[in-house]
Amino acid sequence: MSAKDVNSWYEITKFLSFQVPMEGSQGDNVCMVMNSGRLPSPSVAWFKDEEPIVSNSHLEISQDPDHCKLMVYQVTPADSGTYKCVASSVMGTITKKFLLNIEG
């Protein structure tokens, strides 16, 4: 990839942002996925209502070369909120927000 290609790609990706509304019912398992395959070796962070998420038995974060995934098990209305995945690399940043609403 030439320097011109890198600069063009950076300009394209540095401000990409997506927002997805999601709904579920109490007790469901909810999966949020972002395609990060366009970014080489991205660092990935997940947030709920702007607070960092740490993987545990209720919230499972996983990543493969092309996708970033957050699995929320046995959701409750308390899981409702804005989830955000941020993937960053030298080529730019991609952000995807999920607006999760859980009915009680």
Image: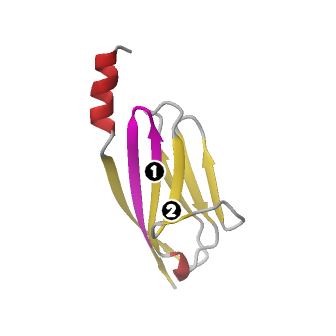
Instruction: Name the spot of residue 57 as percent of width and height, x first.
Output: 72, 65
Q: Is residue 51 magenta?
A: no
* Depth order, front residue of 72/103: 72
41 relative to 11 in the view: left or right: right
Q: Amino acid at mark 1?
A: Val
Instruction: Name the spot of residue 96 as percent of width and height, x first.
Output: 40, 53
Residue, far bottom: 104
**Category of crowding for the residue at label 2, using alpha-carbon neighbours closer than 10 angstroms: few (below 14), some (14–19), many (at least 20):** some
* Depth order, front residue of 81/89: 89
What secondary structure is marked by label 2?
strand
Instruction: Name the spot of residue 53 as percent of width and height, x first.
Output: 58, 63
Residue, far right: 57
Would you identify the image quadrant in which residue 22 lies?
A: bottom left
The numbered dot on residue 47 is: 2
Q: Is residue 98 magenta?
A: yes
* Image quadrant occupied by the N terminus: top left
Q: Earlier in the sequence, mark 2 or mark 1?
A: 2
* Picture residue at 45% right of the left edge, 67% below the top: 50
Q: Amino acid at mark 2?
A: Phe
**Vertical relation: 96 (above or below) 102:** above
**What scheme was used to colour the molecule?**
secondary structure
The numbered dot on residue 26 is: none
- Give the labeled residue for mark 1: 86
Asked if disc 2 and disc 1 are in contact, CB closer than 8 Å, the reply is yes
**Vertical relation: 88 (above or below) 86:** above
Task: Read off the magenta span.
Answer: 87-100
* Depth order, front residue of 21/43: 43
* Picture residue at 48% right of the left edge, 76% below the top: 80
* Depth order, front residue of 103/95: 95
Instruction: Name the spot of residue 14 as percent of width and height, x first.
Output: 33, 40
Would you identify the image quadrant in which residue 30 lies?
A: bottom right
